[in-house]
Image: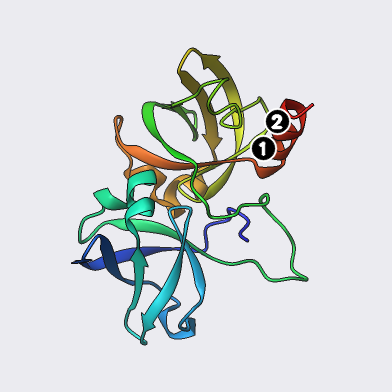
Amino acid sequence: MFTGIVESMGSVLKIEKDGTNVNFTLSCPFNSELKIDQSLAHNGTCLTVVECSDESYVVTAIEETLQKTSLGKLQVGDKVNLERCMMLGSRLDGHMVQGHVDTTGTLVKVEEKGGSYELSFEHPYSSKNHPEWMTVKKGSITVNGISLTVVESELETNKGMFSVALIPYTWEETTMHLLNVGDKVNLEFDVIGKYIIRMMASR
């Protein structure tokens, strides 16, 4: 379980295919604190540490993860948002994030708002097939592992659109400032909303 509050950015050092899996070697400021079997969110995707040292660590993404997320597009030198799993007894600063990416979205617009930034995204949506992929104004959404509040939300046939606002700190201290229009991002929709929609559908 995560909170969507990015702890640091990591750098991709090496990418190696292993059958249908891909092993990513990365470095980050807390390499020396990691241990094997630890869960670590990479751009919002929960991956397990399989090797670690003071200089780097390795995680493995299986084929399904590569298909459902944007991790397959990573290249050596890319930056990723990192968050270690939450600790019981600490403050929950973001919202409940599972690290299970639902789908990818596409950045369609970036607006500078006198110091803050508003980013707009499109994503697949279907009231029949994926009603849980819904956003609401002032609701929570996880974009590349970052817990954000929805500013505007629109739902159309086979397409959803939403925007989020970023303060300068979030813009600079995460990978958001590295995104370009057309880039893919990992999306995880609010788990509470998913349960509500599923309960209503079963009635």
**Height in image: 194 above or below 32?**
above
Snapshot quadrant of residue 15: bottom left
Q: Which residue is mark 1?
A: 194
Q: Which mark is residue 69?
A: none
Residue 175 percent across, percent down from the top left: 39, 50
**Height in image: 102 above or below 157?**
below
**Height in image: 65 above or below 38?**
above
Residue 89 percent across, percent down from the top left: 78, 71
Snapshot quadrant of residue 105: top left
> 50 and 89: which one is in front?
50
Which residue shows up at 54% across the image and 29% down it?
130
How packed mark 2 is, by other alpha carbons closer than 10 Å (few <14, some 14-19, many 20 or more), is some
**Height in image: 30 above or below 92?**
below
In the displayed orientation, state which residue is furthest to the front.
202
Dot 1 and dot 2 residues touching (CB under 8 Å): yes
Q: Which quarter of the image is occupied by the C terminus? A: top right
Residue 187 percent across, percent down from the top left: 48, 41
Which residue shows up at 54% across the image and 33% down it?
165
Residue 115 percent across, percent down from the top left: 49, 35
Q: Which residue is mark 2?
A: 197
> 83 and 165: which one is in front?
83
Which residue shows up at 48% across the image and 84% down it?
35
Q: Amino acid at mark 2?
A: Ile
Secondary structure type for disc 2: helix
Secondary structure type for disc 1: helix
How packed mark 1 is, by other alpha carbons closer than 10 Å (few <14, some 14-19, many 20 or more), is some
Q: Amino acid at mark 1?
A: Lys
Gap in Å between the C-alphas at discs 1 and 2? 5 Å
Q: Which quarter of the image is occupied by the N terminus? A: bottom right
In the image, taking residue 88 as reference, residue 176 lies left or right, namely left
> 155 and 130: which one is in front?
130
In the image, taking residue 9 as reference, residue 40 lies left or right, namely right
